Amino acid sequence: MSTSRDRDAIVAETRGARPAGRDDATPRDPDAILVELGCDLHDAWRRPPRRARLAGWRRSVVVAVAMLVVVPTALATRDVVWAPAPAQLPDSARLPGAVQPRHAGDQVYIAGGTLRGVAWRLSASACDYAAVRAVGVFLTVPGGGGGARCDIASDGVGGVTPKVLAERLVQTYFDPVAGRTWAFGALPSGARRVDVVATGARATVSTAPADATAVGRGDLPAGMRVFVAALAGARDVPLVTARDASGDVLLLCREGRCRTPNPKGTP
Amino acid sequence: MARPRLDADRLAAAYERDARRLLVFLTRRTYDAQLAVDLVGETYARAFELRRRFDGDPRDADALAAWVFGIARNVLGEALRRGAAERRALRRAGVQGPLLAAEELVRIEELAALGELRAAVAGALAELGAEQRDAVRLRIVEELDYADVAGRLGISEQAARARVSRGLRALAAALDGLGPPAEATP
């Protein structure tokens, strides 16, 4: 990549070099593109944060008004079942061949707790397609979260069919705040224990029943159980095995895609 | 002595050091150079927002790169699930990000050796026997169960597994050593 010595020269050449509105479009090489992006980012990082632009007394007024609005709202919504729904997916972001679910339930909080000192919360929603039901699960932790939505099925090239979507019961999220990789998911009622195999680490955790009220209101699969595991560092999670009460393998999940094993124990 | 904090200058230095291989990393996983550039921007914008939570030593280039690549994996996962780049942090930072012309997209694809990768995969597939090629296509491209693969090919499930396994081994051998010069994930 270019050094800082020639950065100014490259930026001078590439500033405003975006295709739109430029007549003498000289293609930039990848390094010049990255330098341009890097300079824009660095400029943004050096700008004072927005709150510093408010005068002191104005800031106090803003904070006071915000408290009046936010605190009662937070108190009123702290224990509710309903979780924030994922943003509506614009049609332009859908792949060709998108399959709309016949019915999509509301996003509900199904479980919460604290693991290794980090508070977590799981929310889920269900999407009914013609032949299968997919469940999308999101993990929320301080500073962020991740998961999957259930309404993105597509029969087009490169898309995820409803059947494949329904098999994606396990998700992972690298938490840069806590420096942990979270593995989590929603499993059938028979699942009691989960073995999580990651690159360089493994963990075994118990499942817990999802909140029954939330399951009912979200029209989620009856008896659904959840698991959450946290592994130190950034890791890939190639295999998750769900076992029933007797220790037999119920589901084998490779790269998050879960299938019932055949009698020989492999999916 | 107190450990220095991750600040804008240190993150900018990390960007200079790592952005190129992150671009390659993301291009090879999205097959979309414009999306990859957007994701590079979103990754570093998020890293800046989260910089106070980085509990490593910002002078440790490897630790910082590992942390940033972890964020990039999240950003990539979101993009693949949504089919588009999530640009929340970029918007908050007021950064638009470069829009690329067709030839610029091609140059990034060349950097990531996508053409070479596509050609190598196509060549290796062509080298496979028809039986193995069909089995690999049904299992990997169409994501069928082994039972379905066996049903389609009119063979036993065990034979289907063997064909897929042999086909993948042959592909892996053909692609062994084919890597872009700049890609390395921590």
Image: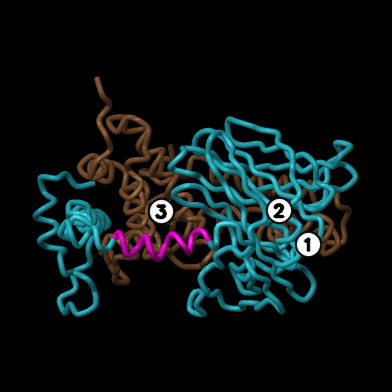
In the image, the chain rendered in cyan is A
Q: CA distance from mark 2 to mark 3?
A: 38 Å
User: What residue type is disc 1 on?
Assistant: Pro
Looking at the image, residue B24 sits to the left or right of residue A128; the answer is left
User: What residue type is disc 2 on?
Assistant: Ala
Residue at numbered disc 1: A221
Residue at numbered disc 3: B113
Q: CA distance from mark 1 to mark 2?
A: 10 Å
Region rendered in magenta: A63-75
In the image, the chain rendered in brown is B
Badge 1 and badge 3 both on one subunit? no
Residue at numbered disc 2: A186
Indicate the chain on which mark 3 is placed: B
Q: Quick check: marks 1 and 3 in contact, CB under 8 Å?
A: no
Dominant SS type (magenta): helix
Q: Nearer the viewer, residue A165 or B24?
A: A165
Q: CA distance from mark 1 to mark 3?
A: 45 Å
